[in-house]
Image (tube, coloured by chain):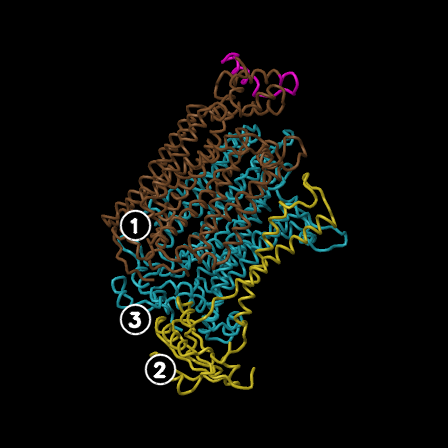
Amino acid sequence: MSDKTLTLYLAEYESAGACVHAAEKLRDAGYAAFDAHTPFPVHGMDQAMGLPDSRLGWLVLPAGITGVSLGFLMIWWMNGVDYPLIIGGKPAFSIPSMVPILFELTILFSALTAVFGMFGLNQLPRHHHPIFNSDRFASATDDKFFISVESSDPKFNLEKTKKLLEATHPTNIELVADKDDEVSEDAP
Amino acid sequence: MASNVEISEKNFMIREGGPWSSAWKVAAFIGAVGALTAVAGAMTAENAHRFVYSYIFGYFTILTIALGALFFVLIQRLTSAGWSVTVRRVAEFLASGLPVMAVLALPILINIKHFDWYETVAGTPGGHASLVETQAYAEEHTAPAGEAKPEAKEAAKEHGAAPEHAVAAEHGATAEHAGHEGHDPNHVAHVETLDKKKGWFNLNFFYGRAVFYILAWVILGTMFFNLSVRQDKSKEVGLTLRAQAASPLAMMAFALSLTFSAFDWVMALDPSWFSTIFGVYVFSTAAVASLAVIILITMSLRDAGYLKSVVNVEHFHDLGKLMFGFNVFWAYIGFSQFLLIWYAGLPEETTYYHYRWDASAEPGAGAGPWAGVSLILLVFHFVVPFFLLLSRNVKRKLPSLKLGAAWLLVMHAVDWYWFVMPNFKHYSFEFHWLDIACPMAVGGIYFAYVFFRMTKHALIPVGDPRIQRAIHFHNA
Amino acid sequence: MSSHNLPIKELGEVSLVAEGTTFKSITETVAVVTETKAPRGWWIGFLIAVNFTGILGAAIGYLIWTGIGVWGNNSPVYWAWDITNFVWWIGIGHAGTLISAVLFLFRQKWRTAINRFAEAMTIFAVICALIFPGIHVGRIWYAYYMPPLPNSMALWPNFKSPLLWDVFAVSTYFTVSLLFWYVGLIPDLATFRDRAKTKVRRLVYGALALGWRSSNRHWQHYERAYLLLAGLSTPLVLSVHSVVSFDFATSVIPGWHTTIFPPYFVAGAIFSGFAMVMTLMLITRAVYGMKSLVTQKHLELMNKIILLTGSLVGYAYAMEFFIAYYSGNDFERHVFIHNRASGPFAWAYWIMVSCNVISPQLYWSKKLRNNIAVSFVVSILVNIGMWFERFVIIVTSLFHDFLPSSWGYFRPTLIDIFIYFGTLGLFFTLFLLFIRWIPMIAIAEVKATLPEADPHWDPSHASHDDAHGHDEDAHEEPAAQPAE
């Protein structure tokens, strides 16, 4: 992907609490390109990592408004202008009977945006990530908690970062490199 | 977040001398002024009829708050909720005012002759006189009226003819009857329809039902309050279990009393109109208004320096979400009723919306004064609060949530005005000073009682076994 | 947040997961189902279900070849089993959305054990439901008339028709349910990927997991998306069954035109859906040993919801009956008294009332709520009762219409019966495949409900609650884990 190979430190923890404390330490030390990997979303981790609030809602609201507007235009054009029909004594273009469809389109547009917006913000699907080169990392989806610090972080330093991580009492620390030749083996 | 205040009764009592210790006096004053004015109105001949409508408007505006608070308490008990324990007591105070609301129902019950159906069905001489006349008219001018005819005739014979129009002239509301009596096919249909409902609009049965509502409210309002405050002292876990065990049956009594009191005292103002969803509709207003009041009272208690350690933004966020959700529910129910009646277009049902939209009974009369109120409800009860309260940040900022709650409370009153008042005089909007006096009377008396009880008990259920869970509650 | 969230024993609160459950044991219990050979029971069920699906295919083929005259529908009963089945299936689907969305919003953590299940059920039920409007048009090659597509006759659909609202509502519902389900699955598919022992599993689950690496930066947006989907699905689920009810209630047919239909249909839908979740859950739980994750507590809570929604449905029946009287409308009264409570279809009406209103009342007793046999029987009864509810609504309002000379009776044909039971076959086929290959319990979500998921959890405090402390390896998973 990039010319510079990405390496990262991967620290492993037994409990959610230890992982949160480690994240707090990294945040306070000024790291930006670090992440926590936990089998489930851990309460309070967002604050511990210093993450801003998710912006996803601000994508969904305009999508919903788009849905309702497009629906309105569609029905207005099709039933009100292009092919007016009087049904049940109601005017060709009547607003009350539009409401169900306008509602459904609002929900449809919003839901699609919520899901694909989430994928976009998370940059998923993603074919490969160096973190998968770690053999231990498989338990991040099972019962272990990890902190990763990427070499792209300006504060990243092989010695200092390791020291900082060691101070958080991980059960294991490893340096994971992006070994391109082995990617096809380990990547999902 | 963690509380430094010890969770004990004495730390959560209203302090002497503060605004909350005398709040009940203010409410009582408002109630007294309203009550005196309303009674003065009720005593005069020209306002007696108006009084009943204004009173029902005021009564249901407040009753729905009390019943909604009872619903809040019941649902927390039913779900064994932990998050809401520290705000539950405010709802319990509000629900404990239900016995007062039971007493305040009396002005409706003693004024039953002002209901539109009374003279037609309940067997008063005046009513049957008109029935005879319409029957004669029906035979002359319209197709045979069907099975109802002989029955109606018999009923009329049974009571004999009596000075017609006497009752009608006495009450302004029946001006319509007096005017068109015997000459309007719609009126014939109206009387025939009512004749088929005589079993329901039977005076003994009507009062019997009222006794059931009143008993249900007295028992439920008292029981759940007592179970909770007794725990303040005893800390007995068994009281929680008893409240939880009683909640399902209580919920049934709540649903039935709310539905049928609304049928009897509001829907029956237009006795030929009916809607199966009406009980649910009234419930939705109750849920929104009670949550708004719970939010407002809890916030102003906090502003006065109480509850700071036990009620925080997380609780308000949840209450705000519930209020928002139930307001959407209100719109959903209101729209469902409208859509179905509008779409089918049956004349016996569309009257409801004609009275609340048209300028007159003439076809194609266009929008009248009530159309504005209908639109206000659509825009300011639903659209504006929806966008105002949609965002998470708004619900988590106390001033903006407070604005939303106060706003919805005002719209709640408008909603009830819209439910009741078009029945007073169809197609015309006439504001009357009794429309202010009656809500003042009912609201003042009710809140005086509620605020007075607040000075006597702890503001949170200090003995509830789940209280720590509520204090440390976080929104996910 | 450590001690006060633990169950309070004096109040009868219990842990949502059995004692000794750990992160690892949850993963194992759920994953092992898809990694080992299917038990014989699965194969028997699958073969039966596939056979029924075959019958469905044959019956639909015959119907398309011959025309919908092969159904028992007649004049004036233009709708009968087809729409009954459609509404029944859609209704069953609603419990899935309710459990995944509404209970999520109300923070009912017990939902985590059953939500995946229920969401899968939603999708399969909606697929079964969609068959009926698809084939009931007769000439299914004209089905493309339903969406607003430009066509050579320059016609547009009639947007004032509740049937078209249905098209939008049900297709939106299907899309959103599928998205919701898939979003929930991603972390669990990643778990399967990371456990994969074979290349095929690694490739398939790896592709489906989209490269998920459990990153907290991802969890943050993920959780917000989940919350938004829950917030969107809740009004959606209300709207879908409301729109279905509009099919009936916008008309002027006595017994159909009543304003309580929208919320009443929604309550009934949730009711039937919970009953179906209960039926499926009881079977699966017994076959696959999920008792540590789906505990008695879960079953009891579900039974309480069945009691609640059953009572709501009873309220709606009572309102309909009462207002039919109160309206003073002779036709309404006639339908309820002479076409439903008595008359040729009284049997169906009373099956409906006894199954839907009376049978859940057993659950007032705590003992019966916790009895597996009773739960199973009642769940089946409710499914039957809710089918009859739709049958009663549709047939009894039509068979005696405004023209007495055309009054008749409705009898289903063999094809009606084949197609109905065929959809059951399709439903169970899809369901059994789901159980076989997809994590049937939301692994990540259940893990988050364990006490040790809380970062403030202190193992020394937990001792009074239950035995499991830090020695996670000491507790082996309760489910049988055959040697590999």
Mark 3, Cα crowd under 10 Å, few <14 / some 14-19 / many 20+, is some
**Residue C136 on image: x %, y %:** 64, 48
Where's the N terminus of chain A, which quadrant? bottom right
Query: Is C460 on the left-hand or right-hand side of C191?
Result: left
Q: Is residue B147 magenta?
A: yes
Q: Label for residue A166?
A: 2
Seen from the viewer's position, the closer of residues C355 and B271 is B271
- Discs 1 and 2 share one subunit: no
Please, what is the three-letter code of the amino acid marked with disc 3?
His
Residue under label 3: C470
Measure the C-alpha gap from mark 1 to mark 3: 36 Å
Q: Which residue occupies the foreground of this view, C226 or C124?
A: C226
Residue highlighted by disc 1: B461
The 10 Å Cα crowd at callout 1, few under 14, some 14 to 19, many 20 or more, is: many
| Chain of the residue displaying label 1 | B
Check disc 2 and report its element: helix, strand or loop.
helix
Residue extent of the magenta highlight: B137-162
Secondary structure, magenta segment, majority class:
helix
Q: Residue B133 sits in which quadrant?
A: top right
Residue C269 colored in magenta in the image: no
Q: Chain of mark 3?
A: C
Q: Colour of chain A?
A: yellow
Q: Residue at x 65, y 56 (%)?
A: A70
Q: Amino acid at mark 2?
A: Glu
For chain C, give the colour: cyan
Residue B192 x, y percent position in the rendering: 56, 23
